[in-house]
Amino acid sequence: MIDVPTRDPRAPRRARLSLARREAVWAYVFLLVPLVFFATIRFYPAIQSFRLSLFTWHVDPARRDFIGAAYYQELLTNPVFHQALKNTLLYAAITVPASIALGLGIAILLQAIIAGRGWYRAIYFAPYITPAVAIAWVWGWMYNVNFGIFNQILIAWWDFVERIGMPWLAISPQRFLRDPEVALIAVAVVIIWQQLGFQVVIFLAGLQGIPRVYYEAARIDGANPWQLFRHITIPLLNPVLVFAIVITTINALQLFDQIVNINFTDQGGPLRRTLSIALYMFQEAFGRARMGYAAAVTVVLFLIILAITLIQLRITQRKVEY
Amino acid sequence: MLGQGTELRRGLRDSVRPTRGRRLNGWTVLAYALLTAGAAVMVFPFVWMLLSSFKDAREVLSPAIWPREFTLVNYIEVLTRTAFPRWFLNSLIVAVLSTASVLFFCALVGYVLATMRFPGKQFIFIAILSTLMVPTEMLVIPWFVMSAQFGWVDTYWGLLFPGLIPGFGVFLMRQFFFSLPRDLFDAGRIDGVSEFGLFLRIGLPLVGPGLAALGIFAFIGNWNAFLWPLIVAQSAHMRTVPVGISLFSGEAGSAWHLIMATSSMAILPVLIVFAIFQRQIIEGVVLTGVKG
């Protein structure tokens, strides 16, 4: 830059222009493959899903008939879709608050200790990165009605309380995944168990980012632990909390791996009480070859996720204005 | 004024320290107790899986906790009855190739969007960002239609193509390149470094932590992926580990000793890798969590 002669004002400008053009050309050369990828593998399929949802399905595109919003009308009345939607929202309503609260609690406990903090953090985090498919089978085995460990423990407990003469303390064995009233909660427990570590890790990082002086100053002013938590921890942790809530909500809305595998012989059962939107889409598209209808289901899922993302954007942007 | 301030602060620290020290004992004991109980809950399913996998077909159904004798027959049976080694190889091929692609392309696009000047930059960035809102569920049907049309079903390319350049990775790497001073690249340009050289030799070495985090996530994400591989891998020899163990366990019905051996073979390698790279992986989560 310094070497550029300044005598003729047009010469350097032309030189810079061509430099800028060179840079732009190279930028597009680098972006060529990725842009083709995003256009064909991300954008086109997303639009294609909208289109497929307006046509009857046939392998040959020429034989797909336009039916307008008929599939969307079916969604309004189809009880199975309603059950899947209700279950999915229930999964979110259970797993999000539970994993946030537990994750925050564990992160606060971890902050209170020094020795072994890394070990505990690693133990809580481990389930998060293990394959959900295998995890679902392990929990399915533990929930097994006749031979699962949970019922074995309940039976042993029953024997014990009877022997010591306090049978009213006994809890009868549960049917867990076979009980329509309990199955969804049993699955939600698995999801909380597996996602907890993620919350712990990001909350712990968030907590450590809060300067200790704030707490010390507030303590000197006579604040009690609850006030410290309510007026220092929560507000300063807010961006992390919003992030964690959005991520876990979107994960809950897309549940698939666990639901397919935890009740493999009756996927989504019993009585469709564990069926999620993603599994419903999969069954309709690849089990019953109703691609158009399944595409309509995914469009609805997309709209729900879009709404959540927009709400998140509004919340986080409001925070920036402060 | 300043001296008084530090004095005050030192005094405050001294007055706070003893009380904190006193309270620490009671609270830390409670914290350790709660954390240990929680950790036991987290570890138990893994322990139970392993213990079950070492029991024979009859013993696995008994209430005994500890196997009478540790047997490896379940593992041998799974390895001989299924194509598990092949599934493992498939998962490895898919995870390694897609991680390589993710690292290269996400870094390249992130670099271009963060450091280069060209028309249409903002539009391209927002377009890529907007793909983050589209759930995979919405894409799998068109991907499958596309794969059927082009003969990608049951091929490695079919397993690979959806995950080659995730928008999230582009966003992450852009953030990292943003933190580098622009002068660095302008200086390189004046010194005659090629545009690709600027990226490869000046940019990339400075975003190591970002690449490490992204690479770990791409690998784990691909290793654990289930929905798309389940759709596109149709023959037994193209299955990945999650698809393989899911369908095998489904066939095995109530042979829980075999299912637990299969699950162990899927979970243990991940836990071993995690044990080795624990710190990097968790720091990666923090990095992507805070930045993304």
Image: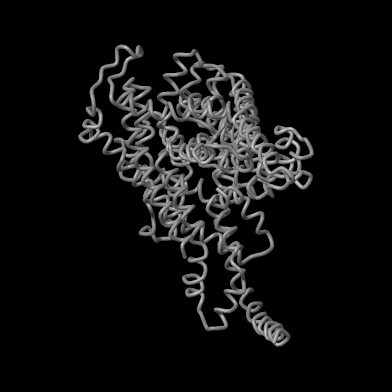
As displayed, is residue B86 above or below residue B12? above
* The quadrant where residue A85 appears: top left
Residue at horizontal 51 percent and vertical 51 percent from the top? A196
A224 vs A293, nearest the viewer: A293
Quick check: B136 left or right of B13? left
B276 vs B221, nearest the viewer: B221
Residue A143 in the image: x percent, y percent? 44, 41
Residue at horizontal 35 percent and vertical 12 percent from the top? A60
Residue at horizontal 31 percent and vertical 37 percent from the top? A84
B5 vs A27, nearest the viewer: A27
User: The N terminus of chain B appears in which quarter of the rendering?
Assistant: bottom right
B223 vs A106, nearest the viewer: B223
Residue A88 in the image: x percent, y percent? 35, 42
* The quadrant where residue A43 appears: top left
Q: How is the image coloured?
A: one colour
* The quadrant where residue B161 appears: top right
Res B120 seen here: yes
Res B276 seen here: no
